[in-house]
């Protein structure tokens, strides 16, 4: 009786399981989290698009220096709003079961602040600022760090492409463990 699911049909749950790296239980937990995040605006549904700021209240994102970029990248319409399915995509990619190449794809787009399909000096300076926060580097230290990142990663001199970024992450075993959170 207490286990009865009235939110999703059996077919909808199977579709979500097939389209994500989430289990049925994780999808139902995600729905509960979704309702907690956006429920102050009436009874939430799966189609309505809610402000990204509501999703950024998720405990796993609340203190993440990239939270605005994360929700922007996962907003399917890039309209500063997210639907439940956008939220499921986010949770799926952040799942421990998502493959490295998929995680790397999204990480690249999160770090591509100017959205020009390449990580360049401008993007990397913002990333470094976000990572160092209150312990900001001196301008010359930041420039050296960005220069070194480009020197070691940019193979063709045109900024770090998505493929170069993915290649870099194959050499970082901790990436898949740090680019995730549990449902």
Image (cartoon, helix red, strand yellow):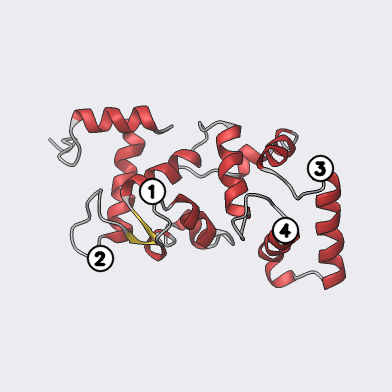
Q: Residues within 10 Å of mark 2 (few under 14, many from 20)?
A: few
User: Residue beneath label 1, please?
Assistant: 87
Q: Residues within 10 Å of mark 1 (few under 14, many from 20)?
A: many
- Kindly indicate the quadrant of the structure image that contains residue 27: top left
First along the sequence among labels 3 and 4: 4
Name above or below for residue 153 compared with residue 35: above
User: Residue beneath label 4, please?
Assistant: 124
First along the sequence among labels 1 and 2: 2
First along the sequence among labels 2 and 3: 2
Residue at mark 3 to residue at mark 1: CA–CA distance: 36 Å
Q: Are marks 1 and 2 in contact (CB under 8 Å)?
A: no
State left or right for residue 164 relative to residue 32: right
The answer to whether residue 124 shows anywhere in this view is yes
Residue at mark 4 to residue at mark 1: CA–CA distance: 26 Å
Where is the N terminus found, in terms of image quarters? top left
Q: Position of residue 162 (x, y in %)?
A: 66, 42
Q: Position of residue 78 (x, y in %)?
A: 43, 56
Q: Are marks 3 and 4 in contact (CB under 8 Å)?
A: no
């Amino acid at each position: 009786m207490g286990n009865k699911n009235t939110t999703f049909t059996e077919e909808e749950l199977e579709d979500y399981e097939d389209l994500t790296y989430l289990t049925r239980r994780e999808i139902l937990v995600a729905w509960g989290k979704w309702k907690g995040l956006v429920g102050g605006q009436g009874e939430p549904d799966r189609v309505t698009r809610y402000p990204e700021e509501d999703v950024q209240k998720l405990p796993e994102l609340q203190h993440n220096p990239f939270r605005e970029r994360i929700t922007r990248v996962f907003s399917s319409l890039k309209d500063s709003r997210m639907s439940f399915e956008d939220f499921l995509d986010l949770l799926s990619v952040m799942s421990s079961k998502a493959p490295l190449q998929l995680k790397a794809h999204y990480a690249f787009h999160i770090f591509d602040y100017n959205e020009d399909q390449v990580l360049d000096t401008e993007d990397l300076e913002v990333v470094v600022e976000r990572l160092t926060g209150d312990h900001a580097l001196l301008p010359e230290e930041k420039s050296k760090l960005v220069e070194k990142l480009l020197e070691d990663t940019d193979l063709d001199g045109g900024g770090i492409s998505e493929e170069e970024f993915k290649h870099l992450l194959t050499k970082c075993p901790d990436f898949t463990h740090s680019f995730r959170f549990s449902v």
